[in-house]
Image: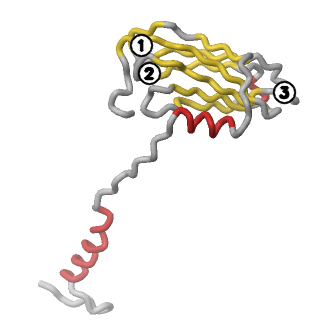
Amino acid sequence: MTRPDRRSGLTRRAALAASAAALLPATTTARAQTAPRETMASVERAVLAGRTPLAAGVTLDMPTLSENGNSVDLTIRIDSPMSGEDHVTAIHVLAEKNPFPRVATFRIGLRAGRAEVGTRIRLAETQTIVVLTETSRGTVHRGAREVIVILGACVDGG
């Protein structure tokens, strides 16, 4: 029983077909695009932006040997007065042999009081962890520490 709608002249079947056709694009599958992979060198160049890093002032507290790369404790301390004129603004953690070398970036404000962060990171294999810190004066400090990993993580590219 398909009576035309008095207002529009559409039958029920035509209205149902039109609404189904309108929903069809919403049911198609969206595919994620893969981001271009960064290399350790390109990440360091981007952070440094032509500046030469200073080798002092960054302390990495982490185990030298980690049995499992899925969760490695890391505490980063930076010698900084954390004053209005001179304070840490960013801490970048890089892992050269991970599928994605940029592990984390922490933004720190003046109200933090001290330049210190603690976290856990995943490591694919034995490698050197590099930390680059940026200050309000525009200087960059660099610290590094090698970690031996017995059972690696990140083997699937994530």
Q: Tell me where residue 79 appears, x and y as whole percent.
A: 76, 16
Q: Quadrant of residue 62?
A: top right
Task: Please give the count of numbered marks on the rendered protein.
Answer: 3
Q: Is residue 82 or residue 148 the one in the foreground?
A: 148
Assign a secondary structure to mark 2.
Answer: loop
Question: Quick check: marks 3 and 2 in contact, CB under 8 Å?
Answer: no
Assign a secondary structure to mark 3.
Answer: loop
Whole-angstrom CA distance, mark 1 to mark 2, is: 7 Å
Task: Work out whether mark 3 precedes mark 1 in sequence or the reverse, and give the earlier one.
Answer: 3
Q: Is residue 134 or residue 54 the one in the foreground?
A: 54
Task: Work out whether mark 1 precedes mark 2 in sequence or the reverse, and give the earlier one.
Answer: 2
Which amino acid lies under the numbered mark 1 shown in the image of this protein?
Val
Q: Which residue is mark 2?
A: 123
Whole-angstrom CA distance, mark 3 to mark 1, is: 36 Å
Question: Quick check: marks 1 and 2 in contact, CB under 8 Å?
Answer: yes
Which amino acid lies under the numbered mark 3 shown in the image of this protein?
Asp
Assign a secondary structure to mark 1.
Answer: strand
Label at residue 86: 3
Q: Tell me where residue 125 appears, x and y as whole percent.
A: 41, 19
Question: Quick check: marks 3 and 1 in contact, CB under 8 Å?
Answer: no
Q: Residues within 10 Å of mark 1 (few under 14, many from 20)?
A: many
Q: Which residue is mark 1?
A: 149
89 on left or right of 17: right
Which amino acid lies under the numbered mark 2 shown in the image of this protein?
Leu
Q: Is residue 146 or residue 154 the one in the foreground?
A: 146
Q: Residue at x 34, y 54 (%)?
A: 31
Task: Work out whether mark 3 precedes mark 2 in sequence or the reverse, and give the earlier one.
Answer: 3
Q: Residues within 10 Å of mark 2 (few under 14, many from 20)?
A: many
Quadrant, the C terminus: top left
